[in-house]
Amino acid sequence: MGKPFSVNINRFDPYKTFRFLIYFGTSTTPVAAMSKATALKRSSDVIEYKEAGNMIIRKGLGRTKYEPITLERGLTHDNDFEQWANAAQVLDTGAPGQSLKELRRDIAIILQNEQGQAVYRYKVYRCWVSEYQALPDLDAGANAIAIEHIKLENEGWERDKNVTEPNQAG
């Protein structure tokens, strides 16, 4: 059995999911009040074909598709979600409008260790907002945080291999 960590050889527990940052576009400031990001998932179609004289059905690799990513955060006066969602379509005095220049952005998702050091970084390409929830259900009897969310369609993601296991000594 291999060692789970190559730099921090005395660490055995995996990274936690509660320390992460999201960056939109080329911004150097993370998105405020993030509370949840859904998993990065991709799947590939399977192309089945039959070959003459062969009893086995062959399987080939087809197209790869990337699942949408949903980002949630507590409602604040930061309007990053709303501005990006408005690029897809917003009513302006009753008529729909779009901003193709602002429609697609790359985003970065950074997983951190308990000390706040980056341990994984993923870049997600050509994202656009396909769903926006500005307000949650409002309920006077509830005891909850107001959450807004966006659903991002994307054209793929990859891990940044330049982010490696940091030394956690100290």
Image (tube, rainbow, N blue to C red):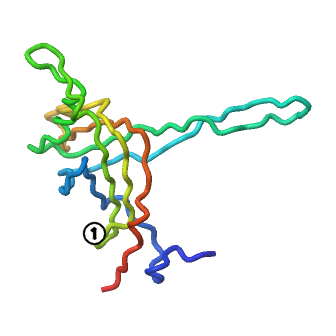
Q: Residue furthest top?
A: 94
Q: Position of residue 82 (x, y in %)?
A: 17, 35
Q: Which residue is mark 1?
A: 116
Quadrant of the image occupied by residue 150: top left
Is residue 28 toward the left or the right of residue 65 in the image? left
For the N terminus, the image quarter is: bottom right
Q: Residues within 10 Å of mark 1 (few under 14, many from 20)?
A: few
For the C terminus, the image quarter is: bottom left
Q: Closer to the camera, 112 or 164? A: 164
Report helix, strand or loop for mark 1.
loop
Name the residue: 52% across, 73% down. Answer: 4
Q: Position of residue 78 (x, y in %)?
A: 11, 45
Q: Residue furthest right?
A: 53
Number of labelled discs? 1
Name the residue: 15% across, 42% down. Answer: 75
Q: Vertically, is 103 above or below 23? A: above
Name the residue: 24% across, 27% down. Answer: 88
Is residue 141 toward the left or the right of residue 22 in the image? left
Q: Residue furthest front?
A: 101
What's under tag 1, amino acid-wise? Gly
Quadrant of the image occupied by residue 105: top left
Q: Position of residue 158 (x, y in %)?
A: 44, 52
Is residue 102 toward the left or the right of residue 123 in the image? left
